[in-house]
Amino acid sequence: MKPFLTAATAALILAAGLARPHAVAAETVQAAATAARERINIDKDWRFAYGHADDAEKDFRHGLRPFFFAKAGYGDGPANADFSDMAWRKVDLPHDWAVELPFDARGNTNHGSKAIGHPFPENSVGWYRKVIDIPASDKGRRIALEFDGVYRDSVVWVNGHYIGTEPSGYSGFRYDITDYLNYGGHNVIAVRADATTEEGWFYEGAGIYRHVWLTKTDALHVAQWGTFVRTTVDGAKARLDIDVTVDNDGKAPETFAIRQEVFAPDGRKVAEGETTQLTVKAVASGDFTSTVTVDQAQLWSLETPHLYRLRTTILTNGVVSDSYDTTFGIRTVVFDPDKGFFLNGKNLKLQGTNNHQDHAGVGVALPDGLQTWRLKQLKSYGVNTYRASHHPPTPELLDEADRLGMLVIDEHRMMGTTPEIRGQMERMIRRDRNHPSVIIWSLGNEEWALEWNELGTRLAVEMQADAKRLDPTRRTTVATSGSGQGVSLGADVIGFNYGAQHDVDAFHRAHPDKPAMMSEEGSTLTTRGIYFDDRAASHLNAYDRQGRPGNSLSIEEGWRRVQERPWMSGMVIWTGFDYRGETTPFGWPAISSQFGMTDTTGALKDTAWYLKSVWTQKPMVHILPHWNWAGREGQAIDVRVYSNGDTVELFQDGKSLGRQTLVKDSHLKWSVPYTPGKLTAKSYIDGKLVASNEVVTTTDPATVTLTPDTTNLKADGADISVVWVNVTDKAGRIVPVAGNRVNFETSGPIRVIGVGNGDPGSHEADRPAERHAYHALSGWRSLAINSLDGGPAVADTADTATWRDPTQWLPPEAQPPATKGLVLRGQFARPVLTPGGVITLYIDRLGEGQTVYINGVTVEPKTVDGALVVDVDPASLKDNNNLAYVFATPEGGVQGLYDRSVGATKWGTLRVTTPAAPWQRSVFNGWAQVIVQSTGQPGKATLKAVSDGLKPAVVAFTARSPS
Ligand code: GAL
């Protein structure tokens, strides 16, 4: 294909001097690291500690210092750059602290009964701190801190300066911190997240659970999310209208050129253009549009998700000021009121699932590889549409949906038109509008206060107008439980939540011009591998049936209704994956929902097999239930079969129980008296055997097996392998009633980051984590001495009554004369030790020649990350203990050591650690899952699974340096 660009099509339409869109959030698109632009991931090596939602003393005294907010740079407690976080836990992002908390009956069942929220102020605030180095050579560049999502109510400080607040737990946000940085030195980022109040009615996690980036650009640069490639397919060609927003953060107007280059999926350049003499005023933005044409456009589709790349280069006097890459796809999307959904002119039904963003083991802190794994798991049973309910998804999910070929309904969190809510929608649309996977903007979901009234229509109309301004290429929808009035009339496409609560046909007749989809259907209540209800265990049988009769339909009935209506664009099932919270119908002690087609680990339930039979073509047949019914001998068991064949014959121990013809989109049913043995289903198409499946009564558990999705990891500290854990009998058959507990150990450069088993009644830990309690030392006293030998001043019995209180300020004239040395003494009470607890004392380096005494006895600190660390023997402690340091007098004397904004954090923090419980999990009905991750080092590693009385399993991994 030859590059196609004529003077006419390359004409850049200048619209300079437009008002800059208000400051918005983090960067998702694929900008290349060039000399002009750097995008640096800063997920690694953060420090984390629990603060406190109600008690400032326990919130590291944050908010107590006079002027802490009133004066720029007066951030106090951990917000201050000088605060010492040496005793805090080290974490890598993404991190969800909620998943590490225990379950508690006082927790909100809608959120999975974790010990977080109003009753748990000690667990509801998380502090994160990180030091970054900014080279002196960065002076003059624009530097921005970009968060893809923090749950929630986050406040950010840089070097003690308040930077901003973001209430949303789902919107990306960005702060230009250029002016606050220390060039050629350390810079401290502090983030306080408060998850006390909730946004949704499902598990939402807590903390910095998405990536954080540092973006460095020239003053003249492409704005955040500043490109938009609008594609129009015209026969074999595609016209690309490319919008670029250029920010000029400099103090002088700029004249520049924009070069656009388009690269085909195979990397060849297929179009380019350049326009010169563009201008943008100082401290302003300009919007520019150019048009190029691509010949023989390779369309993005579910089967062939072709992706193009646009490279936008800004040239100032021939020098590159910025280089910015945008991934996009060329495709057409139509929602037709009579014929339903079309992708590239091809009619197809949306075969969708709704999904929240949590996964077994890791909560909402999904490594990128888990986004990929989850999308593939959905695709494995024929899902082609993902509704990001009810909030914008993590950017990497959309990148992967683009690559794998998955349609996405991208959803805004809450309806409204105030600047805050409008701004969040704007950030979602700007961030996501180049993704070919995104087919529609969902403006909201079941807004009960609006669904039926005129306000609903008004808000939907206003939000739709806003969405169209930002993206004229896509339509909008609102998912609603009330149709006919209100919200349902506002957006382009109606999203019906649950067929049984709408008269969809009456709506269609009354609004023949409005396309429609079932934005939610199902909400069926099934537990994987359970076939008789056991309500005490929060288990509900896995046979497909209505979850809420009169309100929602079974999966099969829902799908049949969609199939019967050509105008209905498709069905998006509630949900793909089970998720924590919404423990319908149980409440506590259940901890997760049961609406999924898979459990929280992604293990398929039988309803997923039904969908596989109607949504996929490769011949398959599936029998339910399993055939381990000890104690039910002779009892008739309801046996069902799903298949995409046309007839199925069922055999019990080789004897035919008859052949039945499948009604399209349905299932087959036999009533079979149980005897231990085997059921076999054979599926035929036109009389030809195409697939068979059997369920066999197993013998007792004998072996643990591990099945990783990969054993090759990138040694990048992020790559994962999702490993199935099964308990099998001696013939290697998964024992469908096994519940053995399995312990996991690793060796080499991998770590376990989460375990799960999909049991909605299990209170086992998904992610056991160490917990620290911090005890500030008190009663500080100092004494100036003329040597570095503490002598009697460090003795346990020393009388400090006449010593100075070093936290009290003295005017310079009242300062004692400089001496050779200082003794600093503090006190601490014997801390309460939890079982297995460990006491550690952390001390900053206060001065030259520092020595440390506890109760008069000298101790030898280790040096860890620059801090002095003392492992304290609990047996050596008294009820009240004395700590003493001796060191050379620093500049400014003892006064120079004290900082009111951070208290005495540097002088000593006593940390009591409750170690993390070991990694272990019981299999649930024979299955569990363990997720392992590279630690960042290359090399060989192993994961071992051990269970009492069973043969253990070992898997070998190789972590390779990214080349
Ligand atoms: C819907 C709602 C979903 C979920 C579901 C459970 O009404 O939109 O978020 O709560 O019910 O059945």
Image (tube, rainbow, N blue to C red):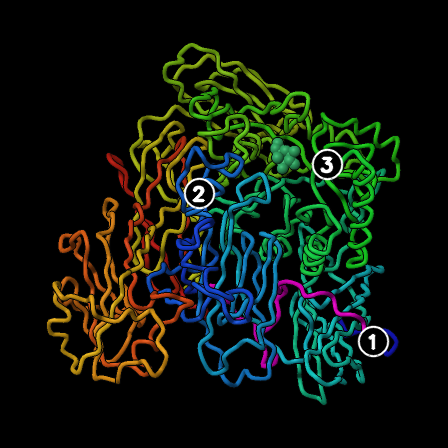
Give whichever of 898, 506 is nearer the camera. Answer: 898
Q: Measure the C-alpha gap from mark 2 to mark 1.
A: 57 Å
Give whichever of 306, 366 is nearer the camera. Answer: 366
Q: Amino acid at mark 2?
A: Phe
Pointer 2: residues within 10 angstroms few (<14), some, or many (20+)? Answer: some
Report if residue 938 is visible in the image: no
Pointer 3: residues within 10 angstroms few (<14), some, or many (20+)? Answer: few
Q: Secondary structure at mark 3?
A: loop
Q: Amino acid at mark 3?
A: Ala
Q: Which residue is found at the position 52% from the left and 36% from the top?
A: 581
Residue with the mark numbered 3: 449
Residue with the mark numbered 1: 12
The dot on residue 120 is: 2
Mark positioned earlier in the residue sequence (2 or 3):
2
Q: Secondary structure at mark 2?
A: loop
Report whether 3 appears left or right of 748: right
> Is 34 part of what is drawn in magenta?
yes
Residue 445 on image: x %, y %: 69, 40
Mark positioned earlier in the residue sequence (2 or 1):
1
Report whether 396 appears left or right of 845: right
| Residues rendered magenta in the picture | 18-43
Contact (CB < 8 A) between labels 2 and 1? no
Q: Which residue is found at the position 33% from the left and 68% from the top?
A: 906
Pointer 1: residues within 10 angstroms few (<14), some, or many (20+)? Answer: many
Q: Measure the C-alpha gap from mark 1 to mark 3.
A: 46 Å
